[in-house]
Image (cartoon, coloured by chain):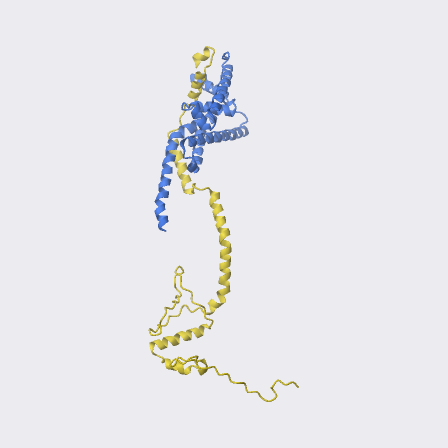
């Protein structure tokens, strides 16, 4: 009995530390998780929902994910996977309900031109294989360098480098083709 | 990017800048608060251990406890008739005579004794409940002086007096031969 009473504050202290650590991770990685989800879904509310779901799953497994680098990498991969699942489900639902995506009509303004450019860029990114897509997205979020992307994806830096190179080449080809500009030499 | 694209080349830097600009979007202001709320809802569910682990622990505990409970029930059932026969716990205890008391006797628990307190188990005596009550009453009467002990001694049959308390000697056992009538000597006709 005495042992249990003596040990109890220690357990509570450990729980409080874990809560504080999770709070720190949440503040550090919330934008990252949101942007990863947004890169897949391109819808703010959906991206927030998916990032939130990823954080809840991370909280459940937080005792095994206390290391900062492992936590961020795990969170990125989980968010990416959840976002892909969400997008597939949305597409299936949309195909069932309407049959076709909604037309993007309206007057040609600067905002419309900007949106059109963004759409072309995302269309080009979407056409990439998943391994190349996640690398190019992560490399352009928060200025991640090759080493950081390698840590997040848990792959060697050389792999990231070659995938990044391939992704850029394909994107340049796609975009120059879309913009009716001669391809780069 | 426009300048570089119009020049006919799309550099890596321009491409990265374009993608970074498309991804430069922040979550809404209450995003972290909403995540905190969801996580707080998770906490009371006991997310430290997965549910399957708790279920497995309960299952193992049940498997271990089941044979023990069965054997305990079997033991209770086998003792049940004796307990019901000699259950006189509701009776008051007689006062103990100080001169004869040498060793402490186990106390008999009253009927309203709390179950959590363990009472030393008295060895079962196979006598009828009414005889036991009468015995208690006799002892009490002797203790309170209402009955003289000599009455008990006088009323005790001689064959039951195993020893003479005055001399401390044990009387010899006398076996009297059976008186047999004629014709009962084991002869066969």
Residue B112 vs residue B58: left or right? left
Residue B72 left/right relative to B185: left
- Residue B4, quarter of the rendered image: top left
Colour assignment, chain A: blue
Q: Nearer the viewer, residue A92 or A11?
A: A11
Q: Is A150 situated above or below B108?
A: above
Instruction: Quadrant for the N terminus of chain B, please.
Output: top left
x and y, in percent, of residue A161 in the image: 47, 21
Instruction: Kindly give the residue lying farthest to the bottom in the view shown.
Output: B182
Image quadrant containing the C terminus of chain B: bottom right
Camera-side residue of B125 and A183: B125
Q: Is residue A145 visible?
A: yes
Residue A139 picture quarter:
top left
In the displayed structure, A39 sits above or below A11; it is above
Residue B23 vertical position relative to residue B54 in the rendered view, above or below = above
Q: Which residue extends farthest top? A: B7
Q: Is residue A122 visible?
A: no
Q: Residue at x 35, y 41 (%)?
A: A13
Count of numbered badges drawn on the protein: 0
* Colour that chain B carries in the picture: yellow
Q: Does B184 sit left or right of A168 as displayed?
A: right
Q: Position of residue B162 (x, y in %)?
A: 44, 79
Residue drawn at (51%, 64%) of the image? B78
Q: Establish if B54 lies above or below B23.
A: below
**x and y, in percent, of residue B152 in the image:** 40, 80
């Amino acid at each position: 009995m005495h042992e249990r009473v003596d040990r109890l504050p220690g357990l509570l202290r450990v729980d409080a530390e874990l809560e504080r650590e999770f709070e720190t991770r949440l503040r550090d990685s919330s934008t990252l998780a949101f942007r990863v989800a947004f890169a897949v879904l391109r819808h703010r509310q959906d991206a927030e929902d998916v990032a939130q779901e990823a954080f809840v799953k991370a909280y459940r497994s937080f005792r095994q994910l206390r290391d900062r680098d492992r936590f961020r990498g795990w969170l990125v991969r989980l968010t990416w996977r959840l976002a892909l699942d969400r997008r597939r489900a949305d597409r299936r639902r949309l195909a069932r309900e309407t049959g076709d995506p909604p037309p993007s009509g309206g007057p040609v303004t600067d905002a419309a031109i900007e949106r059109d450019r963004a759409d072309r860029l995302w269309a080009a990114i979407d056409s990439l294989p998943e391994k190349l897509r996640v690398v190019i997205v992560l490399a352009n979020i928060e200025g991640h360098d090759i080493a950081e992307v390698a840590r997040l994806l848990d792959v060697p830096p050389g792999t990231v480098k070659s995938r990044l190179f391939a992704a850029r080449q394909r994107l340049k080809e796609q975009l120059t083709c879309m913009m009716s500009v001669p391809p780069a030499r | 990017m426009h300048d570089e694209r119009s020049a006919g080349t799309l550099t890596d830097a321009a491409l990265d800048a374009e993608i970074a600009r498309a991804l430069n979007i922040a979550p809404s202001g209450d995003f972290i608060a909403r995540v905190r709320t969801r996580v707080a809802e998770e906490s009371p569910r006991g997310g430290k251990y997965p549910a399957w682990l708790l279920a497995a622990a309960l299952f193992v505990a049940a498997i271990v406890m089941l044979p023990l409970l069965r054997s305990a029930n079997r033991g209770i059932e086998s003792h049940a008739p004796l307990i019901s026969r000699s259950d006189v716990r509701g009776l008051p205890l007689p006062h103990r005579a100080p001169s004869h008391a040498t060793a402490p006797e186990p106390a008999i628990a009253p009927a309203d004794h709390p179950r959590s307190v363990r009472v030393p188990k008295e060895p079962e005596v196979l006598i009828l409940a009414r005889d036991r009550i009468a015995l208690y009453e006799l002892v009490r009467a002797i203790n309170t002086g209402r009955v003289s002990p000599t009455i008990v001694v006088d009323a005790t049959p001689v064959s039951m007096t195993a020893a003479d308390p005055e001399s401390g000697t044990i009387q010899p056992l006398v076996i009297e031969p059976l008186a047999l009538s004629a014709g009962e000597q084991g002869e066969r006709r």
